[in-house]
Image (cartoon, grey):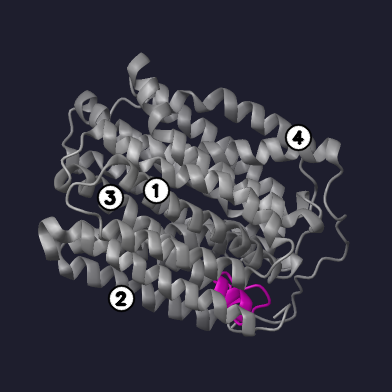
Amino acid sequence: MLEKTATTAPAQRVADGLPWDKRRWAIAAIFTALAMASLDTAIANIALPAISADLHVSPADVVWVVNVYQIALVATLLPLGALGEIVGHERIYLGGLLLFTLASVGCALAWSLPSLLVARTLQGLGASGCMSVNTALVRFVYPSRMHGRGFGHNAMVVATAFTLGPSIASGILALGPWPWLFAINLPFGIVAFLIGVKTLPNLPRAKHAFDFLGAALAAACLGLFIVGIGGAGHQAAPALVLGALIAALLIGWILMRRHADHPAPMLPIDLFRRPLFALSAATAVCSFSVQGLSFVALPFYFEDVLGRSQVETGFFMTPWPLVVAIMAPIGGRLSDRFSAGILGGLGLILLGLGMALLALLPASPSVADIVWRMMICGFGFGFFQTPNMKAIMSSAPPHRSGSASGIVATARLVGQTTGAALAALCFGLAGRDGAALALALGAGFAGLGSVMSFLRLTVAPGR
């Protein structure tokens, strides 16, 4: 066990946010990096066929361009969030942004699949540096009375990036080869880095030492979990899937035992002892599982079941993230006045209703039939997301903002990965009817998340 003598409470107090003249530039730096990392997730999928043809590798092999990025990202979120509490969130952000930018150049210059995979792994690590401390920086840059607005803008950036990602990628590929998709990060990364160096605040540092063994265990736990869940979705050998998941659980148990008395555990069990934090994190996993289920199932549903073209499918997928981008700042403002339990519960009820309506689409739906159902999903998801993010961050003490921020990103990616794997399982079980089954399952996850959100109303404030 680790000794309990180290303290994480900062000796110095932080001013309540930055003044507007500095805040606007700090926000620009934070959100530019967030948009780059979010866009890169979306555009890489579009580029896979071109990369496969250019590097002369099979589609099964080129999928690792996405997989290694995701594994590196998810596995290091919690360790980097914890490290941010010790060395400063702003340093983790700037280091992550610099690595992401340089690795993007490496991706653009890659001459083979192995060289591209190395660059993508480093790029995922850089993206993790930015995303692990993203919400922690927002918490300190915005004054407390504007936290809901700040988290709303944060969610809006992510939703906008996912909305525009496929279109941006298609436009770039229409003008040039796939390396341009990565090279375009260079100017934006340099500008965001220089702005961040000048404007991001120097935040308090925790006093305890960084636990390198604990970081390795946390990375192995999350990495194996993603490998296991992703393998199940891609119908990998059952022995491989079970082995990865069992190993993840075992390592997680060892990590919890190791950090039982630690003041700032790598796997933040101290925060999960707070009912509001635990319920908010679980609600986030449920909601993003719905998103993962739907974003995998719907393209197959539109094209294979309804016989729509790829262009039409892209159009049908747009209303959801577009409405989320509109609703996120509205939900943020409302979260400064109303309980996250109420806002999140109502939002997830709407999300579940939208998923059920999509599952029950008529055999030959019109464009309007599809669009208004997708808009309901986006409205519900956007109404939920920002208040829930604020609940997670506000239920953690300021000196644990790094770990709380890491949980925000981890819950999102774990939920999306789990949803995608469950969607693949639905197709394996039900074949052509798998999409409708996945949508119905998504409605169930939204209902479960709604119940957990309303349970937050029974928790006393600050717990």
**Residue under pointer 2:** 246
Foreground of the two, 212 or 395: 395
Q: Who comes first in sequence, dot 4 or dot 2? A: 4
- Label 1, label 3: how many angstroms apart (C-alpha)? 15 Å
Q: Is residue 88 visible?
A: no
- Label 4, label 3: how many angstroms apart (C-alpha)? 38 Å
Name the secondary structure under disc 1.
helix
Foreground of the two, 114 or 169: 169
Name the secondary structure under disc 2.
helix
- Label 4, label 2: how many angstroms apart (C-alpha)? 45 Å
**Residue under pointer 3:** 298
Q: Are marks 4 and 1 in contact (CB under 8 Å)?
A: no
The image's mark for residue 372 is: 1
Which one is closest to the eye, mark 4 or mark 3?
A: 3
Is residue 68 a member of the stretch shown in magenta?
no
Q: Are marks 2 and 1 in contact (CB under 8 Å)?
A: no
Q: Is residue 388 above or below residue 262?
A: above
Q: Who comes first in sequence, dot 4 or dot 3? A: 4
Question: What's drawn in magenta, residue-wise?
Answer: 261-280
Q: Who comes first in sequence, dot 2 or dot 1? A: 2
On screen, residue 27 versus residue 309, left or right, reads right
Q: Who comes first in sequence, dot 3 or dot 2? A: 2
- Identity, as a three-letter code, of the amino acid under mark 1: Trp
Q: Who comes first in sequence, dot 4 or dot 1? A: 4
